Amino acid sequence: MDDNEIIGLFLARDEGAIEAVSREYGAYCTAIAKGILGDQGAAEECVNDTWLKCWQSIPPQRPQSLKGFVGRVARNQALSAWRSENTQKRGGGQAALALDELSEVVSGGETPEGALDRQAFRAALDGFLASLPEKHRNLFLRRYWYLDSTEQLAKRFRMSLTQVTTTLHRLRQKLRVHLEQEGFEV
């Protein structure tokens, strides 16, 4: 079943949509959630919450990319679960480290003006990512979207740990410069 057929099931409020999206993207969403939460059981629970959130969101939304949509929902669900789990016990973890690294460049505060600029920011970020060589773009996305550890990145990209951390630092600095050139205050 292709993505348009699955979206059609959601729009028709056919409960078969949950089974279809689970079959098509269950492993993908589980991998995202497990990368953030580090626990298979918690990841599976998060993915079940993802399907519920998709059911509640489609309609009124009609995603252009179902894979991107469910991946984003799974990531957000996993981050929410991670925050809930770590609210009382402030500890290490790859999610905290990756998010702290990015906080140097992008603040988390949301203002009404900031909400209006979100689309412009997204376009600027897309432009930044498009300007990077494929390896650097993939390294950046694996670290800050999928929240892979620097050790996992070193292994995946056949780089030393020092190369990974240095490259990520330089990419964050390039992002800062790019955002400033686009008119964002960082």
Image (tube, rainbow, N blue to C red):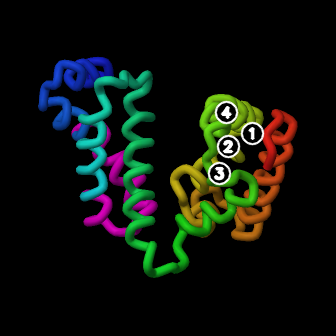
Amino acid type of the residue tagged 3 in the rendering: Leu
**SS for callout 3:** helix
Q: Secondary structure at mark 1?
A: loop
Q: Amino acid at mark 1?
A: Pro
Q: Secondary structure at mark 2?
A: helix
Residue denoted by label 4: 117
| Distance from the alpha carbon under mark 3 to that under mark 1 | 10 Å
Decide: few, some or many residues near mark 2? Use Cα within 10 Å; few <14, some 14-19, many ≥20.
some
Foreground of the two, 123 or 163: 123
Give the residue pinned by disc 2.
137
**Mark closer to the chain start, 2 or 4:** 4
Relative to 93, say whether 110 is above or below. above
Q: For the residues carrying marks 3 and 4, which lies nearer the camera in this image?
A: 4
State yes or no: discs 3 and 2 in contact (Cβ < 8 Å). yes
| Position of residue 129 in the picture relative to residue 3 (left or right) | right
Specify whether 17 is left or right of 179. Answer: left
CA separation in Å, label 2 and label 4: 23 Å
In three-dimensional space, the C-alpha distance between marks 3 and 4, rounded to whole angstroms, equals 26 Å
- Which residue matches tag 3? 139
Distance from the alpha carbon under mark 3 to that under mark 2: 5 Å
Q: Tell which tag, 2 or 4, sits nearer the viewer.
A: 4
* 2 in relation to 112, above or below: above
Q: Height in image: 69 above or below 32?
A: above
What mark, if any, has residue 133 been given in the picture? 1
**Which quadrant would the N terminus be assigned to in this image?**
top left
> Residue 22's spot in the image, x, y percent?
23, 40
Mark 3–mark 1 CB contact (< 8 Å): no
Give the overall secondary structure of the magenta segment.
helix
User: Could you tell which of marks 4 and 1 lies nearer the N-terminus?
Assistant: 4
Q: Three-letter amino acid code at disc 4? A: Asp
